[in-house]
Image (cartoon, rainbow, N blue to C red):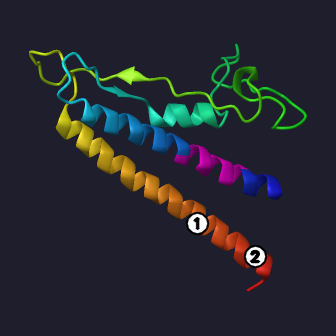
Amino acid sequence: MLNRLTDSLNFHSEALSLRSERQRLIASNIANADTPGYVSKDFNFSDALRQATGQQSVGESSIGTSRLQLNTASAGHMGLNGAPAGSRAQPELGYATASQTSLDSNTVDLDRERANFADNTVRYEATLRFINSQVRTLNTAITGQ
């Protein structure tokens, strides 16, 4: 029972830190909109979250699409790819393709970046609300109100 509660809180904690990192990247892209030669950066949030929570498949089996998982005595013994517990893998950054050609080779599209910034902000706040709701529910269950 306690495992499910901590897994859920850990999932939302990882999502929150990845949302924060994505917000930083988008803000950096916006700040460098006028920098000649700057290439816009971003990462696939769902892939990064799967990787951070250890839900990404390690390999394919010969049977088909079943996934191989690392079998340990405790979830805290080893992280993803043998990394020590508590260490965080950085998401794999990708580069945005230019939607319009520019003379200075800058690939930042301000409209796209602003939309990504607003979307990520809303999702960040939603994750915060999920965490607050879970903590409030736990508090209610513990105090018996």
Closest to the observer, 111 or 36:
36
Q: Is residue 122 magenta?
A: no
**Outermost left residue:** 103
Q: Secondary structure at mark 2?
A: helix
Q: Position of residue 89 (x, y in %)?
A: 61, 28
Q: Is residue 38 above or below residue 55?
A: above
Q: Which residue is mark 2?
A: 141
Badge 1 amino acid: Asn
Q: Is residue 80 above or below residue 63?
A: below
Which label's residue is closer to the chain start, 2 or 1?
A: 1
Marks 2/1 in contact by CB < 8 Å: the verdict is no
Q: Is residue 15 above or below residue 129?
A: above
Residue at 33% x, 39% y is: 27
Residue 132 is tagged as 1
Q: Position of residue 110 (x, y in %)?
A: 19, 36
Q: Quadrant of the C terminus?
A: bottom right
Name the side, left or right, on which 127 lies relative to 35.
right
- The range drawn in magenta is 7-16
Instruction: Kindly indicate the quadrant of the structure image that contains residue 111.
Output: top left
Q: Is residue 10 magenta?
A: yes
Q: Position of residue 108 (x, y in %)?
A: 22, 28
Residue at 11% x, 18% y is: 101
Residue at 64% x, 65% y is: 134
Name the side, left or right, on which 70 lies relative to 34.
right
Instruction: Kindly indicate the quadrant of the structure image that contains residue 33.
Output: top left
Q: CA distance from mark 2 to mark 1?
A: 14 Å
Q: Is residue 78 above or below residue 17?
A: above
Instruction: Kindly indicate the quadrant of the structure image that contains residue 31.
Output: top left
**Outermost right residue:** 73
Q: Secondary structure at mark 1?
A: helix
Q: Position of residue 116 (x, y in %)?
A: 30, 42
